[in-house]
Image (cartoon, grey):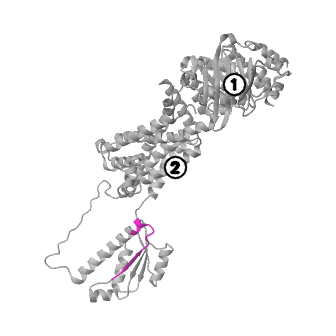
Amino acid sequence: MHDKQQNNDLAPFGGNPGRERGPIITVRNLVKKFGSFIANDNLTFDVYKGEIFGFLGANGAGKTTAIRILCGLSAPTSGEVKIAGYDIYNETEKIKKNIGYMSQKFSLYEDLTVSENIRLYAGIYGIPLKKAKEKEAELLEKLEMSDARKKLIAGLPLGWKQKLAFSVAIFHEPKIVFLDEPTGGVDPVTRRKFWDLIYEASNNGITVFVTTHYMDEAEYCNRVSIMDAGKIEALDTPKMLKERYSAKNMDEVFLKIAR
Amino acid sequence: MKTIKYILQKEFRQIFRNRTMLPMIFGVPLLQMLVLVFAATFDMKKIDMVVVDKDLSETSRELIAKFDGIPFYHLETAVPDATFGEEMLLTDDADVVLVIPPNMEKDLVRDDKAQIQLLVNAIDGNTAQLIFSYSSQIIGNFNKNLIAEWKGLPKFTPPTEVTITENYWYNSELDYKWYMAPGILAILVTIIGMFMSGMNLVREKEIGTIEQLNVTPVKKYQFIIGKLVPFWVIALFDLAFGLFIAWLVFDLPIVGSLWLLFGLASVYLISVLGLGLFISTVTDTQQQVMFISFFFMMIFILMGGIFTPVESMPHWAQMLDRANPIYYFMRIMRHVVLKGSGFFDLLQEFVSLLILGTTFLSLAIWRYRKTS
């Protein structure tokens, strides 16, 4: 419990979202249907600049569908979405310059080395080689992975892979980073370290949009939305949600909403 | 431009890091050239002939001796009657049965004519035709000699006769291997182009790495070029490697310009690579890519004129062949390699391949979706 508290203090705006800075993601009446199945049912929400926005829900609630739409990987059926001021329908390529994405499924190239993966994405985002090299050295130093620079990704432990995937997703310093269940399947210690990286990115001004079903992680967020069966059932700061549902922790809140 | 450089660097690294890749690049052409070129032949190497000699005369023995003297006729003479010969046809132990009726010699002497019978196993029509024409040629020659021997040569004026002297152009020794080698090479290059590129792209879909690329500002054409260029290079390399083997092993003469051959092959490859990539954009698994590519490959190869002449196909099939890239490339391969045709002789093939290539590649780029 003590740890959680400490982390909440680390959060850029504490329990108070940076509403005054204005929204960076606006979603209005977003609907996504697969045939007759409604995966996202009329979602409406804003994400403010610089906040850590938790996107919660049980498996199959529609989190991944929504995050894929926001990243431009999937087209919405209807509704309005603006990311960093750009329209999701006509300006996807502009959006892509301003976002980073880490998918649920690990998707760096296993048959390339750590350094080759970093340089590839740096190159695609147009970072000059010299700068990329400097940043790469700095990053690997920070992750304590300098010795693994020339190792193939395939041989790295899962925790390292995830930290690396996150670092690659924000290597080009995007305005927003989307993380889809970034800590799935790793031990609690590694998860804590991973959240340190998220806070660091947030402190550097990157807006973080993260899906999870670990409720302790929900406490680390500035605001969380809770999805159930394609709908957003609640959206507020963890503190307010706990008060409203008179719950001791987010676990209880979640169970009360998702039943 | 720089983005393409980074993407190409990635693709080449992955390809050469793949352990099955190098053996494939060198092994497949080696195997195809050394095995398939010898195997895919219509040349008659051995004819099993059963002789039913009911005459048992000097003339019949002379006729049998004629056949026996030819190395690729394997004779089975210890056969009592025609039924036995027919049975051997049935069990595939014989390709042809020669039946010499009783009294052949007598009939010849008395009536100046006699009949003998050839029963040919015609499961394979082509082979049967060949056997029949070889055999009747031998009998015909034997016949001529008989006439000359028995009746004596005409004394003063020999009968006017048209003789045909043969001169086979472009493959003067009628070496079937020279005909097949360019064809097999065309198949090789096609397999590499169509399968490898398509499988590679769809593999990224299966693993999920394609999503990470799709959230970047990478352009669709940049991505497709990244998937096309490496296999284009590998296929051209394999064409060179295969030609080298053919030259080394079968003395395949390369009459035309190599520059022209590789220039046209480059254009051809864009069309098959484009098709392979297009297939991979409409499928989700390597299995699907394999199945669909294989389906097209079969049609293209069987209709492409590698094994059977396109000129003998029905008119509608020949029309369909206009959309078959292999058909053009097959002509290019054989014409440049064996005949030494120049660019202007193959202008039509060039233009057609250019159109097909542009179409398939545009389809692939158009159909590749960063947003599903």
Please say if A34 is above or below B68: above
Look at mark 2 in the image and give the residue it sits on: B294
Question: Residue A29 falls in which quadrant of the image?
Answer: top right
Specify the farthest residue to the left. Answer: B156
> Residue at 52% of width from left, 35% of height from top?
B368
Please say if B26 is above or below A195: below
Question: Residue A146 falls in which quadrant of the image?
Answer: top right
> Residue at 51% of width from left, 25% of height from top?
B3
The image's mark for residue A163 is 1
In the figure, is residue B191 to the left or right of B108? right
User: Residue B62 at x, y = what percent?
Assistant: 34, 80
Q: Secondary structure at mark 2?
A: helix
Q: At label 2, which amino acid type do we have?
A: Phe
Highlighted magenta segment, given as a residue range: B115-128
Q: Chain of mark 2?
A: B
- Disc 1 crowd rating (10 Å Cα; few below 14, some 14-19, many 20+) is many
